[in-house]
Each structure stands twice: as C-alpha cells, then as structure tokens.
Amino acid sequence: MNNRFKTDFLSASSSFLTGMGSVVNLRGHLYDYNASDDPDQLAIAQDWQMVGQDMRDALKKAEKEFEPIARK
C-alpha cells in the first residue's frame, strides 16, 4: 500500500507564500509547469499505474477479509 505513484506532476505546486506572491506578481510568470516531451503520455501511464496499484490494494484487502471464511 505504500507504493504510491505520483500523479500531480503536470500541475504547478504552490504554497501560501506563492499565492500571496501571485497577488503582487508584476512579471506575469510565477508558476512552472511540466514541459517534458510528451506530458500527456506520461500522465496516462501514471494514471494506469495508479489503477493497477488500486486493484492490487483491493485484492490484498479482499484476501485478508475472506481468508477466515476460506479456512472454514
């Protein structure tokens, strides 16, 4: 369950101070976004990895829940 994939790499990370700084931002460019060669392909791959991780987690949980029933 601890093997989580990163899914927020396309969005800019911000904090309270970044938000406050954007109020007085005169330059007009405060946030940096992922500009890799093909971010959509990377995002879709990461999404499917998350789906796979969720399915593995659900199977482990089901095995733990139904193990006592199978022993009877």
Image (cartoon, rainbow, N blue to C red):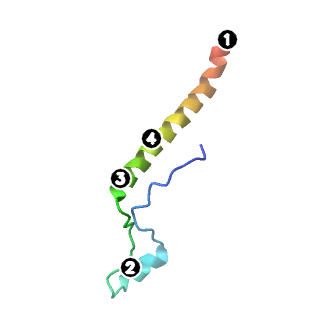
Which residue is denoted by mark 2 in the rendering? 30
Q: Are marks 3 and 4 in contact (CB under 8 Å)?
A: no
Left or right, 60 with respect to 49, comes to right
Which residue is denoted by mark 3 in the rendering? 41
Which residue is denoted by mark 1 in the rendering? 72
Which residue is denoted by mark 4 in the rendering? 51
Distance between mark 2 and mark 1 Cα atoms = 62 Å
Camera-side residue of 38 and 32: 38
- Marks 1 and 3, the one that precedes in the sequence: 3
- Marks 1 and 4, the one that precedes in the sequence: 4
Q: Residue at x 37, y 82 (%)?
A: 23
Q: Residue at x 38, y 80 (%)?
A: 22
Q: Are marks 1 and 3 in contact (CB under 8 Å)?
A: no
Quarter of the image with the N terminus is top right
Q: In the rendering, at what x and y percent does residue 70 appear?
A: 63, 15
Label 1 is placed on what type of residue? Lys
- Marks 2 and 4, the one that precedes in the sequence: 2
Label 4 is placed on what type of residue? Val
Q: In the rendering, at what x and y percent does residue 11 appear?
A: 39, 64
Distance between mark 1 and mark 3 Cα atoms = 47 Å
Image depth: mark 3 or mark 4 in front:
3
Label 2 is placed on what type of residue? Leu
Distance between mark 3 and mark 4 Cα atoms = 15 Å
Quarter of the image with the C terminus is top right
Image depth: mark 1 or mark 3 in front:
3
Distance between mark 2 and mark 4 Cα atoms = 33 Å
Left or right, 57 with respect to 71, comes to left
